[in-house]
Image (cartoon, rainbow, N blue to C red):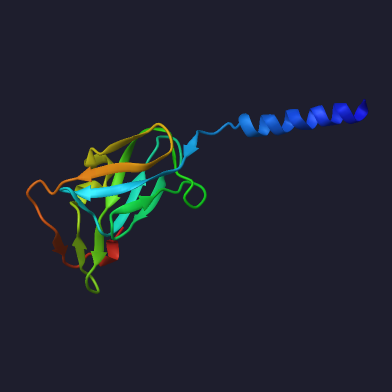
Amino acid sequence: MRLLIVAATMIAVVGCLAGCGGGPKIVPVSGVVLIDGQPLTKGSVQVMPAGFRAASGTIGPDGRFTLTTNEDNDGCVTGTHPVRVVGNENVGPSDIRWLAPKKYASPGESDVTVTIDGPTKDLKIELTWAGGKPFIEKGSAGGKE
């Protein structure tokens, strides 16, 4: 009888630990960043939930990224969140080539949001130059983000 009580208690504790987590739900998220329909080939993405740690990922040469919040590739908190995309590269000791407009590097200016409602491998973040094009900013590599 005592063994049965111990076993039942252990099952209850394990069940509570698995299902009683107090934090927001994090789900696996990966996708692609496009600029004017083409993959952004370098940079980083941050999804910025209010009141919780941002999820971030590095953009590969094919435009793809995988988000990390707490552990490698664990994903992002569910909900609708602002997005920050920094698309640039150093091209000299103090020069930066911007591969996406600088406005996307600031979540307050970018007006880009994503809705994460479950695990996905197909999140699409679409940016535009709106008639602009990549440019080199002289003397600013020290401030690269």
Furthest-bottom residue in this view: 93
Say which residue appears at 47% left-offset and 50% top-offset.
73
Q: 61 or 98: nearer the eye?
A: 61
Q: Quadrant of residue 123?
A: top left
Looking at the rendering, which quadrant does residue 19 occupy? Answer: top right
Q: Residue at x 78, y 32 (%)?
A: 10
Q: Position of residue 96 (x, y in %)?
A: 21, 65
Considering only vertical position in the picture, is 90 above or below 123? below
Q: Quadrant of the C terminus?
A: bottom left
Task: Using the image, determine if residue 78 lies above or below residue 129.
Answer: above
Horizontal and vertical percent for residue 31?
Answer: 34, 46
Residue 53 at x, y percent in the picture: 45, 42
The residue lying toward the viewer, choosing from 141 and 69, is: 69
Residue at 28%, 42% (x, y): give it.
124
Q: Is residue 39 left or right of residue 72?
A: left
User: Where residue 40 sits: x, y (%)?
Assistant: 24, 55
